[in-house]
Structure formats: structure tokens, C-alpha cells
Amino acid sequence: MPDLHGKLSDDEKDKVVSWLKEKWKGPVICPYSKDSEWIIGEYIVAPINYSKKGIFVGGEDSPQVMVVCKNCGHTVFLNAVILGLFPPGGEVSDARK
């Protein structure tokens, strides 16, 4: 798992790269710059949850890994649980239920 600040280790980044090599059928071309070079973001991030009253803090979240186009910065977010960086459980909801 990432450190206390959400930073990925080199081993975790390597795990993401291996997962991408298996799942992304390449070359994966950026839809904006048409480049095919991508980098892994340094940190786990999560989208902000909103409710009718504004930002909702303290509920379930979906930890994400950023995969960033090296040329233009276009960013793809991948679920860190599915990547195997977090254990399954309360971190994300299972849409199949």
C-alpha cells in the first residue's frame, strides 16, 4: 500500500506498469496530443464527493492512480483497488451489487 501520504513506491509504480502492459492494448495514443508516452503519477488521489449540501468529507471514496500523457498532461484515472494497490473492501463500492 502507498505510504501515509499516499505516495507510491517504485515497486507499486512497477506494478501499475505491469498491469498496463497486460490490460492496455498498445500503443495507447493520447486523444489530444496523439503521443504514446505515459507516466505514472506520484500519489494516490481520490475524486471529491459532492452532496446536495456541497462537498462530502468522510464517506467512501475511490482511490485512483493517475496515468499522465508525458506530452500534454492529459490524465487517465485507474481504480487503485482493481490495480491491487489497496485491498478490496470499504474503500470503494462494488457497482455489481
Image (cartoon, helix red, strand yellow):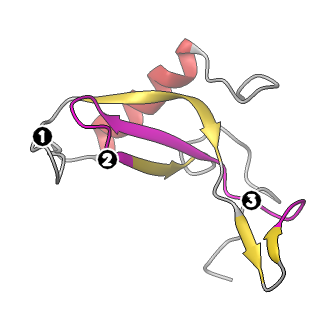
Instruction: Say which residue appears at 77% left-offset and 26% top-offset.
Output: 5
- Residue position for label 2: 23
- Residue position for label 3: 61
Which amino acid is tagged 1? Pro
Residue 31 spot, x, y in % from top left = 17, 54
Q: Secondary structure at mark 2?
A: helix
Q: Secondary structure at mark 3?
A: loop
Q: How far separated are the C-alphas under marks 2 and 1?
A: 11 Å
Residue 85 spot, x, y in % from top left = 63, 37
Which amino acid is tagged 2? Lys
Residue 86 spot, x, y in % from top left = 70, 41
Relative to 96, say whether 49 is above or below.
Answer: above
Q: Quadrant of residue 48?
A: bottom right
Instruction: Say which residue appears at 49% left-offset and 23% top-offset.
Output: 13
- Nearest to the observer: residue 64 or residue 32: 32
Q: Nearer the viewer, mark 2 or mark 3?
A: 3
Which amino acid is tagged 3? Asp
- Nearest to the observer: residue 12 or residue 41: 41
- Residue position for label 1: 27
